[in-house]
Amino acid sequence: MRVRDIDKEKLVIEMAIDQIVQEGFQGFSMNKLAKACSISVGTLYIYYADKDDLIQKIGASMALKFFKSTIKDFSPDMPFEEGLWRQWENRANFAMKYPKEVAFFEIIKHSPHGEIILDSIKEFADFRAIMTQFTDNALRNKELLPMSFEAFWCVAYGPLYTLLNMHAERKSMGGKPFVLTKEIMKEAFQAAVKGLKP
């Protein structure tokens, strides 16, 4: 039985993310991945049962990294505005530190793999519980307007992800050069909070 090579496994993950981000699922195959890594296709099957297994394992690893990063220095008992700002900072830091991984996860999140990945991660249920507790506390403390989850998410996080997309593309509307600064982020955050508070 062949032994796992950690460096080779890291290369496989890196190249799989690259290929899926650049070419989507249609352009991705185990053969192309093996060739890009200069290994045999058989070597890939030491690490993964098949292409779906590879995508789901990499996706689960990325999701777990994101969930852990999002709740860093965060407590569901924080006052609403402070806790939401911490969420913005954590999410922005993650997106800026791992842009390719975020692009990869966005692709698989909207595929049949998305639900399978989230269902396979025990920590996702914990993450959801923490975020639910946070919004429940804010509602109870009259720091948050009652609204549907979808409306809340759009107002609370939509502006941040729009800014992060412009930052990733290095341009804003009309092709104007753009780099996200803390000042711009804070400006959008204050507008979002106004729309969320009673």
Image: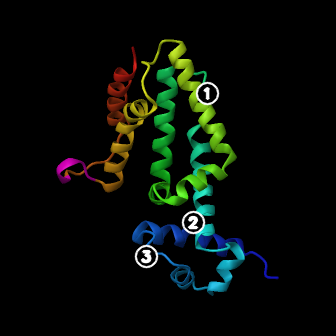
Q: Which residue is mark 2?
A: 55
Q: Is residue 79 left or right of residue 130?
A: left
Residue 48 is situated, as x and y percent measured from the top left of the image, at 67, 72
Sequence order check: which comes first, mark 3 or mark 1?
3
Q: Residue at x 68, y 73 (%)?
A: 49
Q: Quadrant of the N terminus?
A: bottom right
Sequence order check: which comes first, mark 1 or mark 2?
2
Residue 53 is situated, as x and y percent measured from the top left of the image, at 63, 67
**Residue 4 versus residue 145: which sits nearer the camera?**
145
Q: Which residues are magenta?
A: 171-175
Q: Amino acid at mark 2?
A: Ile
Sequence order check: which comes first, mark 3 or mark 2?
3
CA separation, marks 1 and 2? 31 Å
Q: Disc 2 on helix, strand or loop?
A: helix
Asked if marks 3 and 2 touch (Cβ < 8 Å), the reply is no
**Residue 127 versus residue 14: which sits nearer the camera?**
127
Q: Which residue is mark 3?
A: 27
Q: Quadrant of residue 190?
A: top left
Q: Does the magenta segment cover residue 173?
A: yes
Asked if marks 1 and 2 touch (Cβ < 8 Å), the reply is no
Q: Disc 3 on helix, strand or loop?
A: loop
Q: Which residue is mark 1?
A: 75
Q: Amino acid at mark 1?
A: Ser
Q: Quadrant of residue 67?
A: top right
